[in-house]
Each structure stands twice: as structure tokens, then as C-alpha cells.
């Protein structure tokens, strides 16, 4: 969190981030939490470092509404979808943003706390209530969002995920 949080925050080290470094972040062995490289790596290969930095800059600009910056960032950089975007947000600001991916979605559904999402709303607008639920769970359990995300992995119990550890 310390290393990558600094790399993603616009007021710190974002201006020197390269696509190759970002590809490294996406690997489980580097971030120690998710396997994101299969989601974005091919798309990033054809992208520009400038576009990637700008997408992360917009995504992490807390002076703008969350839904707006999420939608802008995700639509501007190929390879950055909900799992990657929310992982970046989480690592940049670990107390304020939880991760929305298939695992967290399934876990929230199993726990019967999945929020009602407005049909036809943007993905960013859907992330806002999901993040509120994640923050509420974090407060209620007195667990950091990072740990809560790990617990989701156990709740879902996917054989595919277990394979990553072997």
C-alpha cells in the first residue's frame, strides 16, 4: 500500500509512472492481493503512458465527484475496468475506497448486503453505493478495507482463486 499508494496519488509520484511499472502492480506477486494482469495487460501494451497517467490522475482526483471521475477514467484508458480502477483507488486511499470485483460482488451478495443499484446508471454511479456498503462493513467489523477484501475471498471460496496460491 505504501509503495503503490504513492505511485498513484496525483500529488506524489504519478508523473513518473510507466506502463511497465503499472503492469507489475497488476501482478499478484507485486500487489499481494489480486491477479489483475490477465484483465488489463494486453490492452495496456497498445496504450500510451500519458493516457494511463491521466486516467489515474482523474480517478484519484478527490476534488471531483466519485462517479464522474470513475466513469471518465475507465472510459479513457483501455484495460482499466472496475476491478483495476477500484484496486487503484483502494491502494491510493485505502481508508476511503473498497474494491469492486467479481469476488467482492459475490461476497456482498452472499452476505445479503448487496445494494440496490439503479438500472441504466453508469458504472461509476453504481460503484458509489457499493463503496458505501464496503465502508459500512469495514466500520461495523473494525477491519481495514484491505482485510475485508481478503475475507471476501474466503467467503466466495472459488477454486480458481485457490489455484493462485498453489
Image: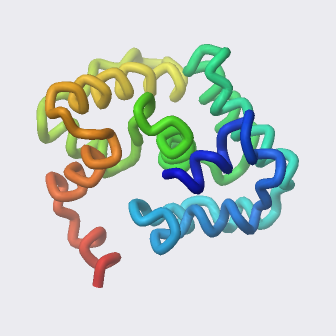
In the displayed structure image, the side of residue 96 where residue 110 appears, left or right:
left
Query: Which one is in front, 62 or 38?
Result: 62
Q: Residue at x 39, y 15 (%)?
A: 118
Rendered image quadrant of residue 122: top right
Q: Residue furthest bottom?
A: 166
Q: Residue 36 location in percent, x, y?
A: 51, 61
Rendered image quadrant of residue 47: bottom right
Residue 63 vs 46, above or below: the answer is above
In the displayed structure image, the side of residue 86 where residue 159 appears, left or right:
left
Task: Tell me the colour scheme of the image.
Answer: rainbow
In the displayed structure image, the side of residue 135 where residue 57 appears, left or right:
right
Q: Residue at x 37, y 20 (%)?
A: 129
Q: Residue 79 location in percent, x, y?
A: 65, 53
Query: Which one is in front, 147 or 126?
Result: 147
Q: Residue at x 12, y 36 (%)?
A: 111
Residue 21 vs 89, above or below: the answer is below
Q: Residue 139 location in percent, x, y?
A: 22, 26
Q: Residue 11 location in percent, x, y?
A: 74, 34
Residue 29 vs 108, above or below: the answer is below
Q: How many marks?
A: 0
Quadrant position of the C terminus in the picture: bottom left
Query: Which one is in front, 52 or 135?
Result: 135
Amino acid at each position: 500500500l505504501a509503495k503503490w499508494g504513492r505511485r498513484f496519488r496525483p500529488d506524489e509520484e504519478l508523473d513518473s509512472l510507466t506502463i511497465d511499472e503499472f503492469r507489475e502492480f497488476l501482478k499478484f506477486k507485486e500487489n499481494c492481493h489480486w491477479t489483475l494482469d490477465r484483465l488489463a495487460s494486453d490492452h495496456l501494451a497498445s496504450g500510451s503512458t500519458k493516457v494511463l497517467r491521466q486516467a489515474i490522475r482523474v480517478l484519484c482526483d478527490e476534488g471531483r465527484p466519485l462517479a464522474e471521475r470513475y466513469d471518465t477514467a475507465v472510459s479513457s484508458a483501455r484495460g482499466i475496468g472496475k476491478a483495476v480502477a477500484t484496486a487503484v483507488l483502494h491502494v491510493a486511499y485505502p481508508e476511503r475506497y473498497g474494491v469492486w470485483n467479481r469476488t467482492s460482488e459475490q461476497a456482498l451478495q452472499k452476505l445479503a448486503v448487496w445494494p440496490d443499484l439503479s438500472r441504466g446508471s453508469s458504472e461509476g454511479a453504481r460503484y458509489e453505493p457499493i463503496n458505501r456498503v464496503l465502508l459500512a462493513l469495514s466500520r461495523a467489523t473494525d477491519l481495514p478495507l484491505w482485510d475485508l477484501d481478503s475475507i471476501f475471498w474466503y467467503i466466495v471460496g472459488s477454486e480458481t482463486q485457490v489455484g493462485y496460491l498453489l
